[in-house]
Each structure stands twice: as C-alpha cells, then as structure tokens.
Image (cartoon, coloured by chain):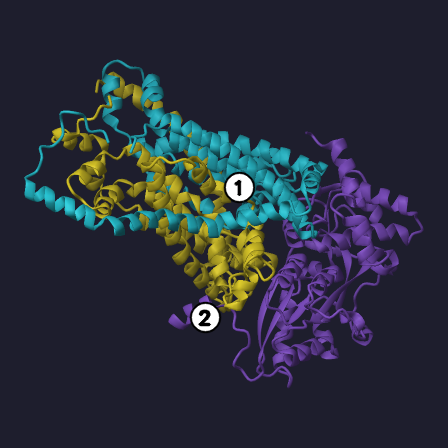
Amino acid sequence: MTLVEGHLPAEPPDGLSVLSHSRATAGRVPRLALRALGPSLVVTYLSLLVLLPLAAVLDNAFQHGFSSFWQAVTQPEAVAALKLTFLCSLAVAIFNTLAGLVIAWVLVRDDFWGKEFVSAIIDLPFALPTIVAGLTLLALYGPDSPFGIDVAGTKIGIIFALAFVTLPFCVRSVQPVLAEIDRETEEAASSLGAGRLRVLMKIVLPSIAPGLLSGAGLAFARALGEFGSVVLISDNLPFKTEVASSWIFSLSQSDELSSAASVSVVLIASALVVLIVIRYLVSRFTVQDAP
Amino acid sequence: MTTARKGRRSRAKWPLRVLALGYVALLIILPVGTVFFRAFQHGIGTAWSAVTTPDAIHALMLTLLVVAVAVPLNTVFGVGVSLILARHRFPGAWLLDALVDIPLAISPVIIGLSLLLVYGKTGWFGNWLAARGIEVIFSVPGIIMASAAVSLPYVVREVLPVLQEIGDEQEQAAATLGAKPFTTFRRITLPSIRSGLAYGVTLTTARVLGEFGAVAVVSGDIAGHTQTMTLFISDSIGNLDPTAAYAGAVILALLALGVLAVLARRPEGRRRWQSRSDRSASDSELPLLSTTSA
Amino acid sequence: MATAVTTLLVGVPASGAATGGSVSLVAYSTPKPAYAALLTAFAATKAGKGVTFSQSYGPSGTQATAVAGGLPADVVNFSLSLDMNKVVKAGLVSSSWAKGPTKGMVTNSIVSFVVRKGNPKHITTWTGLVKSGVQVITPNPFSSGSAKWNLMAAYGSQIVQGKTPAQATSFLSKMLANTVAQPSSASTALQTFLSGQGDVLLDYEDDALYAKSQGEPVTVITPPQTILIQNPIAVTTHAANPTAAKAFVAYLLSPAGQKIWGQQGYRPVLPKVAAQFNFPKPKTLFSIQKLGGWTKVNKSFFTPTKGKVAQIEQKLGVSTASG
C-alpha cells in the first residue's frame, strides 16, 4: 500500500465500522475460497495444456537414459540444425524487436492516410496457415521472384520467413504500452530543455522496456519452434539450411521419437533460459508496488 | 510548443515513417496481397465455389467452433495470470511467467505429439479416457486443446505489461472506498487494459485460425469431421487446387481482420478519458492517496 | 445448427445409420483424387450401395503413426510397406496382410523424373542427374516415404547396371551433392519444384502424371532403370464395418476398380488390366526385393544417425557447410 502516514482517513462512525467489520468476517471463508479458486484454475489449465505434455516430452526424451539423450543431442546433424536455428532466431528477435518498435511508434505517434489499414493487417501473418505463408514468401522472394530477389536456400530467407511470423507480436507487445504512456511527463521534460534522445532514454524507454523485452522473448521462442513457413524457403538441406524443428520432424517420422523429444528438450530449455533472463531484466525496469 | 520544435518533429517523422511502412510493405502487405491475388486469379466465382464445397464449409465451421472455445479460455486464463503476476509477489512467479511462453518454443508437431503422449490411446490418460468414452485425440476436443496450447501466451503478454505500466493506484483507491474485487475489476481494471486485451485476443484468434502443425497431428485430418480450415488449405495445395487453398486463406485473413475491427473499436473521447494525464488529475482530488513516488 | 455443433463435439460416429454402414479410409496423400472417382464408382455397385465413407489423407508415415495412435481406420492404404509394418506392429492389421494374390498391394507405380516442360536440360538418364550444374529436388528421406523410393531407385539403377554397392553409394553421394532442396514431404517437394527451383524432381509417376493433368508446365521422363513402387492396402483387425470394408478393398482389386486406378495414372496390379494401358516401359524395372527388401534397406540406409544416407549427408555437410 502506498498510503503515507498522516493521510489516513478519519475513523468512520462506530456503527459503520462494526458493519464493515462483521461484513469482513462473515465473508472471509467464501472469499478465501474464491481467492484460491483463481490461481488453482489457472494452474490446472496450465497443467492440462502445457505442463503435462511438457512432462511427457521430458519423459520420452530420457526414456532410454541420459546417454541416449546426449547422443541424440550431440549428433552432427542435430548440432548443425540447432546452431542454425539459434543463430537465425537470435537475429530475428533482435531485428524484429527494433522493427516492431519503429512500426509501433509510427502507428501510435504518427498520423497518415492509411494508418488504420496498416495497423489492422499487422496481425495477418498469424492468421495465415504456415504453408500458405511459406509458399507466398517463396513465390515473392524465391527463384520466380517478380522483383528478382532470390533468397531461397539462404539464411536470409530463413530469417525473412521467421520475421514474417514474429512481427505481429513484436509490434503488438509495444503498441498498447506506448499508447498508455503519460505524455505529460515527456512534454514536461522536453519543455525543461531535455533533448529528444534524453527524453526517449530516460522516460519512454523504461516504460516500454517490459513490452519490448516481452516481444523479443516471444519472437525468439516462436522462431526456435517454427517449421511450416520456414521449411519451404530454406530448402531444408541437411547441415546447411535444415532448422531444428525440421530435423525433429524427420526424427519423429523415422520412429525415433525419443531422439526427437531430446532435441526438442534442448530447444525448450534454451527458450526457458532466455525467457527467464528477460523476466529478470523486465523486473529491473518495472516499478512494482509491494502488496 | 515552439515552431522550432514542431519543425524538428515533422522532419524526424518522414524517415521513420518510410522505414516502418517499407518494412511492413515488404514483409506483410506484399505476401498478403499475393494471397488475395492468387485466390481471385481465376475469378471470384471460381474462388467462391472452391470454398463452398461441403468439406470446405465443414472445415470453416469446425475452425469457428475451435476459435469460439479456445480463445475465450485463453483470454480468461491470460487475464487471470496477468492479474496474479502483476499484483502479487510470490516465490516462483518468474517461473510461471516463463512457463506461459514455453508452448511457443515447442515445435507445433511436438506439441501435437506430446498431447498424443498424454491423452492418446497409448498415452498416460489413454485408458482412463477410453474407459469413460471420452474422445480427445482425433476428435474435436484435441483440436481445441492443441489450438489453445499454441496460442496460450498472447493475452498474457499483451495485458501484463499494460497492468504493470499503469500501476494499481486506482484499484487500491477503489478498494479503500469499499468496492468489491469484481466491481473494481469490471469498472477500473478492465477499461484500462482494454487496448492490450483487444490486441491479445486478436493475436490469439489469428493464431488459432492459422494453426496447422499441432492440429495436423492430433486431428487425424478426417474430411468433414476433424479437418480444420488450415488442414483443408494444406490438402488443397497438395491436390494442386491453389484457388481453394488461397481462397480459404483469404477467409481466415478476413476473419482475423473482422475480430480486430470489432475489438479495437473505441471512440476517441473515451480513450482520452483513459489517459494517464487525466488520471493523475483526478488523483489530486483525493488527498488520501498522495504517493511517495516521484 | 445445434445438431451440427453436437456432432462436431461428440466426434466421429463409429458406425453410420445408413444401410450399408460407414467405412473409414485412411490413406497417403497422393491417391485422394483417384479415390474420388473410385468411391463414386463403388457406390454404384451392389456391394457399395449405401456405404458412406470418412476419408483422411496425409503423408504416409504420419498416417501410419496416427492409425497406430488410435485414429479410427477400417481400410488403410500407404505408399510403402514399411508404413504398413508400423500398423501391424501396433496390432491393428493382421501380420498376414501380404498373403493375398496381389501380395497386399493395390497399385503400382515407378519413380520418374519431373522436368520443366520440353525438358530444356535434356535429362533422360540417371547420369544426367550427377552432371555438374544440374539441380535435383527430392524430399527428405527421413521424413518422407516418397524420398526413400527415390533414393533406392537411384541406388538400384546403378546396381542393375552392374556397378558395385560402393560405386552405387558413390553415385548416391554425387546426386545428393547436386540436390538443392530436400523438402519435408513429397507434396512440398512438388510445390518447391513448381515455384521455380531445380531442374529435375524425383517423384512417383502417378503424382507426376496428376500434376501434368492439372495443367502444370512439366514433362514426365521415365528413366531407363527405375524401381517398381508398390502401395499396400489392408483392412484393419478392429474395423467397425468389416463386411463393407472388405467389399471395398475387393472392389479396388477387381478389374473394374483397377481400370479406374489405371485411368488415374496408377499402374494396375492385375496384369490383364495393366495391359490395357500404355504406361511407358523402362528398360530395367526392379523391385525393392532386389535390394534386400524394405526392412533391411531401411535399417542400412535410412537410420537417421548411422544409415548410409545419413553418413553421405554428413560428409557432404561437413565439407560444404558454412558453419
């Protein structure tokens, strides 16, 4: 609570205080149960959809012991695929976070004809099935490109496809926060002589940092696991342009589910590490009122 | 605002605008435009008849059903988790926070396979479910679960930063004045997270509409029964029927746009009322809550 | 509307109320258009009257895994017998499925070359695939059954020309070095080829003929040596409607059914029906038996870590990978 000493309200008349007190005690048990209901429902939902399946993947990965897990994970094709995936996912997360910031800025703080249209279509990459996304990108930026841009079979092509599927939340994670920022503080600082860059760094950035970092984390996580939209433009060549999710798919189709699960565990674990690091950074930016 | 500053601002606008719009054009407008072009390449009539076959209509109905169940579930979950994480501190909060995002890092095929491992015939709950005649995998509930799993984080990621940004002063004021928790939520919290929530729900809906990999594994792709729109589209591509595929994709895109149009509709007046500046103005009328923050 | 929603929620009905019953067909993705014609024809027969079908098509391996995992299926039709073995292992198809007169197969095909219309690069033999500058497309053999047929056709083509296994493996390596794309499935491989990549795509003849019939700008070349593709079919042990299912399979194997298969681009398994069609005759047509049978071949070539193909990929990757 942020109540400061000396500003406490005066005691209400006795009758009212008795009423509010008895109301408090009478409602305590159901209210407690109600308060526990929320978190327990949340945890149950998370368990059914995520935790249990995750546990099943872990269980499957280590089914034949740690050595077979290690073998699956250090196998040359797995290592090549994982390296490529990490590199491209990192590149996309950084690049698209910046791009998302610029786009969100323009959408929130700028005004031009067609702005509503641009804002509306930002989400569309999500709504398109990955194979449609993959085919369209291949058509536009592959060998038959009408612009002569052919990035099929290259890392650029992979990053492009990943950028396509991660842009929506790189923009949307910053947009609402940017819209909620108190412009008065910015304008006050500006009128007091602070340069634009200083205003950006000291006032705007701390406010949008949680949104930015969230977007980056999600972009990275999604890029790690993305399959359908990447696999067409990448040409899927083993050791060259085969991403981890494609290798995992191949393993699962070759009756090596345990190896597939093992490589998946590596992806999941690295995503978890990155996300936790991001949470830590976010907590340093956020002003949390103690309950 | 001096004229000098206004001039400085408008000069800085254009490079940024060109950069942003150029990127969006290259990455989104062109590909989406191509989808529309290919759908209607052979005429609107051909496109229409391609997506009004019984299988196509059923696929659309199924997709709509999945959206109607998975999105509200994820929305309630998302708002709930956001409230818990924003307003309370407890050990392991960071883990809950990270776990919510995890489904994204799991390749959709593995999500599908993991659901099979848990709820499939030979899975952990296989016998338990079979004994009660509950069909999850290769039936609609499995599709809903897979769709909800892959779209889990978006509402949380949109709402949580907003909750953290606006702080809980108004909620606390309301509580002190005797408002019940649900009233506080309905009249103070909800309006302030409206834009974040709108985006979160739209992203979730769009993601559920477009999900393929996980659903492909858990549905069995039975035409007319468990074939979603994305599976229909994929099958159409495989059968060299691009018109049906792209026309189907157009439908999904229009649905996503429709959801955004409905949710993000907000009169300018009300929006202004929500801004921080007005809130701090109303704060000054309540001497009870002068905060210690700068 | 309410009934529709309820039906959606309750799941696939196990058996229809219609007089003929309901049969669930689970097949690989290529024959979907063929089945459209076959189902219509079957419905016109006495045995097929009133029988309703639920159909599921997808990559052969995925479908086999799904059936083993509980996907309701009365009739299963895969692209290679390896996938049928998956289902046999799960106890859903009798281990004597291959004991019939057609050895459990319903259609034949061959591995063909799909090239640009007019064959601008004049690719007519396997040697053409290892020439420098030629770009080959084949699906990834670890995720696609079609790719396994392709690679064994390539390998086998050398063996039947008298080369040693070592020389045949070396040929395979040269061909894979020329491979510019290995999409995850046969259908995405075709899409990749149609979007302008590569000079030659290795594919099932029936799939290639279908693409041509749909107006795609391709020419189908029959290599002089190629492998006989055989697609297995079976009725499952727990079929909900075994009479209708068996009748359907019998129809597919009957002269009438085989004729329709032939019209759809699949080589009939009945010699008399096959003779009615004009399928190109390769100089040397060999089967997987010549190379040791699928179980042996799969183990020695396609184990993801130790198989011959994996080792070839590794050598190619290590020497040309950019990090």
Foreground residue among A279 and B1: A279
Q: Give x and y (percent) for residue C322.
A: 69, 30
Task: Give the purple chain's letter.
Answer: C
Image position of B244 with respect to C267: above or below: above
Q: In which quadrant is the N terminus of chain A drawn? A: top left
Foreground residue among B271 and B282: B282
Image position of C254 with respect to A6: above or below: below
**Discs 1, 2: same chain:** no
Residue type indicated by callout 2? Thr
The residue wearing badge 2 is C7
Task: Give the cyan chain's letter.
Answer: A
Residue type indicated by callout 1? Ala
Q: Is label 1 in a helix, a strand or a loop? A: helix
Q: Give x and y (percent) for residue C76.
A: 67, 68
The residue wearing badge 1 is B105
Q: Give x and y (percent) for residue C181.
A: 69, 43
When asked about the image quadrant of residue A263, the answer is top right
Chain letter for the residue marked with disc 1 in the picture: B
Q: Give x and y (percent) for residue A176.
A: 33, 37
